[in-house]
Amino acid sequence: MFPRYDAYLALTAVIGTGLFAGGLRLPVWRRYAGALAAALAFAVGFLVYFRVLGLDPRYYYGKTLHLLLVVLLIGAGAVLLLRPLPARAAAARRSCSAPVVLARVLVALCLVAATAGIAGLPRGGGIFAQPFGPRSTTWSAAWWSGLLERPRQADVTARALAQAPVRDGQVTVVVSDHRREGYLETLFLATLQGTHGASAPAFYNLPLAEPARAAAVVERERRPIRFLATGPEAAAVVERLLAERPELRSRVTLELLR
């Protein structure tokens, strides 16, 4: 599912309030507006490009939205610096010129849009709402409620980190009898060990379940491989693979995770 855009609308409206209230008179805010426009164009262009190709842009499109969100948060954090000083505010109230009236109208519209976005009126769910299965919540609420807890993957990753330090020229791959967990634990381990880039062939674009996953790893990765099995069933997968292909023993080792 695509993300909800309430937060983006709210943040954009708050920043627009600052820009219309006088921020565009300052060079630093004009440069910021250019950066914001570039981030927005990147996200929209990415979405349009994949739509034209007939492909699902969901995952990588989400990454472009992360960039846009960071740029928006920077602007929202700095917008209070644009608040008018009391003397300037009094002078502005005495002015009734057309540009001032137009600026006030634009600021009011931005504030209304921000309020609507924060309240979740356009699509429901409130600011930063995310779809989780049949319901919608926020990332913070999901974390607090335990919805995002993955205790088994966390435990395996911590034990693997302690048992299998990095060895030059060798790739460590976790083998699990639970679908997708071997992939996740291998990815987490490589990230924590700082070997993510070098180890990428061992976990990306491969089957997510055994025994197909282990067989695909030895075909893709030509360097020495250390398989860490999370249990006897997972170890049996690698043992069968080595029995069927004994030539792999020269570069493939198997350890049972303690």
Image: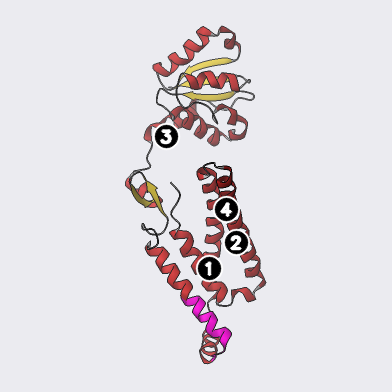
Q: Earlier in the sequence, mark 4 or mark 1?
A: 1
Q: CA distance from mark 2 to mark 4?
A: 11 Å
- Compare residues 156 and 70 and report the one nearer the observer: 70
Q: Is residue 238 left or right of residue 139?
A: right
The disc labelled 2 sits on which kind of residue? Leu
**Residues rendered magenta in the picture:** 95-108
- Residue 105 lies within the magenta run: yes
Residue mark closest to the camera, 4 vs 3: 4
Residue type indicated by callout 4: Ala
Residue 233 drawn at (x, y percent)? 39, 17
Q: Seen from this angle, which residue lies furthest bottom?
A: 94
Mark found first going from the N terminus, 4 or 3:
4
Cβ atoms at labels 2 and 1 below 8 Å apart: yes
Q: Amino acid at mark 3?
A: Ala
**Vertical order, 48 against 34 (above or below):** above
Would you say the magenta stretch is mainly helix, strand or loop?
A: helix
Binning the other alpha carbons within 10 Å of mark 4 as few (below 14), some (14 to 19) or many (20 upward) gives: many
Residue drawn at the location 63% of the way across and 61% of the way down: 35
Q: Which label was assigned to residue 154?
A: 3
Q: Position of residue 78 (x, y in %)?
A: 55, 67
Sequence-first tag of 2 and 4: 2
Q: Judge by depth and name the residue closer to the eye, 220 or 186.
A: 220
Q: Label for residue 15? A: 1
Q: CA distance from mark 4 to mark 1?
A: 18 Å
Whole-number angstrom distance, CA of label 2 to CA of label 1: 10 Å
Label 4 with label 1: CB-CB less than 8 Å:
no
Mark 4 or 1: in front is: 4
Marks 1, 3: nearer the viewer: 1
> What type is the residue that disc 1 sits on?
Ile
Q: What residue sits 62% from the left and 74% below the top?
A: 24
- Mark 1 Cα shell of 10 Å, populated few (<14), some (14-19), many (≥20): many
**Residue 85 in sight here:** no
